[in-house]
Image: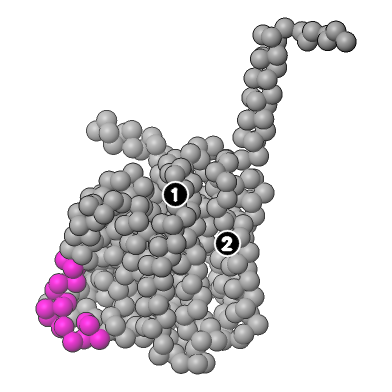
Amino acid sequence: MKEAAQAFGRRKVALGVSLVGVVGAMAFAMTDAAVLHGVGAWYNTTFTDFWETWATSADATFNGGYGHIYLLDRALETAPAVEVVVAPIARIAFHLPFPLQGLVVYPKAFLIAAPLYLSAMALPICAADRLLSYMGVTDLRRRLIVLGTMAITLPTPALGGHPEDLVALGAMIYGLVAALEERHRAAGWWLGTALAFQFLAFLAVPMALVLLKRRQWLGAVVPMVLVPLSVMLVPLISAPTTTLHQLFHQQVFDVLGNITPIWNLDPGVASLVRGLIALAAIPAAVVVARALPDDRRAAANLVVWTLALLFALRAFEPELVPYFLAPALALSAVSASPKPWWRLASTGAGAIWLTWWLHAPVRARWSEWLLLLAQLGVLGWLAMPRSPRLSDEDDKSSVNKAARALLALRSRRGPPVAEVG
């Protein structure tokens, strides 16, 4: 009980920011369409991924539903861990109206599903706060800017029906912190949990292995395999062909014009592009290993920035739904946390701006897509790791300390003696 109270005390700021983020996202989702656009409806009034996850979670509790979950949900392209977690609640609340066959203006199930999905934000926000403390960023104002930016950028996956991305992001960050502290078993279990929710968590696996010693790799890799396999085992046994085909095919959809110019080349290259993005984590980890500084705080900053860069590569997928880049935007704010104030503020503002800007569909237009890449480049430059200095104020304080030390040294020596010529 004492340990739990201490853990709550360490993360009470992050939990408070998470609560504000959940309430704010709920308010936005339930008033945006009605108040801002003059249409009497809530945010999720049609059958989108939000309700697909809800319905699939409930269907998994019926006879054989879990084993044939990839037949029930043709859009499911990762491990069904979030469906397993949500299943009991979705089954109990399945009688509440939600969009299935048609439009539901005020879906009462949203009052249960939305807070449940949005609460997944607490894990990456608390994990980021843990990473900030490891990086030496303890100033409350800096923490609030970073965590507040995450609270604005991370509701997008939840309201898009993909809380698994949030759970995976939080588990990835905790796994990287464990790897930085050379706790290889904890790193393995955290990253195994991340992979059980979202396969793209593989982006963090090579980074974690670089931070660990080679003799620790086996102890870390075993849970990375066992945890996602435990979630996948039933579908793989019950419907192996359907499960494997859907996971490897990675079908994409043109939803309201959320596509990049790559779509015009071939929409079917989605699985190839995602595979290449995942594999890019390996050479990125090799480069990080060569450039890894001795200072573990600076090393943490470099790893987080590189992981944000890898997630930003999702802009090259044929489909570009707004929540795809949410991890990159959130991690950019974490990476900028030790920078001078103007860089930190600019990175936070840029991440929030892109969260809003991405909701305007690119529609495969080269001009808008190239503009997006340029904005991501500027954001990456702002958050790029440099010297391990914490802030402008810290620089000034260090200069003042040096000046005071020099004055003290001179005072001990006494007044200068005039030379006899």
Q: Position of residue 325 (x, y in %)?
A: 49, 68
Q: Label for residue 300? A: 1
Q: Is residue 282 left or right of residue 376?
A: left
Q: Residue at x 47, y 55 (%)?
A: 291
Q: Quadrant of the C terminus?
A: top right
Q: Residue at x 40, y 62 (%)?
A: 285
Number of other residues with Cα within 10 Å of mark 1, as a class: few under 14, some 14 to 19, many 20 or more = many
Magenta residues, start to end: 229-245
Instruction: Determine whether the residue tagged by mark 2 lies in a helix, strand or loop.
Output: helix
Q: Label for residue 415? A: none
Q: Is residue 347 left or right of residue 225?
A: right
Q: Is residue 272 magenta?
A: no
Q: Residue at x 31, y 70 (%)?
A: 199
Q: Position of residue 48 (x, y in %)?
A: 40, 78
Q: Given the current orientation, which residue lies at the most extreme front position?
A: 421
Amino acid type at image mark 1: Ala
Q: Label for residue 380? A: 2
How far apart, in angstroms, are the residues tagged by discs 1 and 2? 16 Å
Q: Is residue 217 left or right of residue 102?
A: left
Magenta-drawn stretch, dominant element (helix, strand or loop): helix
Seen from the viewer's position, the closer of residues 277 and 282 is 282
Amino acid type at image mark 2: Gly
Instruction: Determine whether the residue tagged by mark 1 lies in a helix, strand or loop.
Output: helix
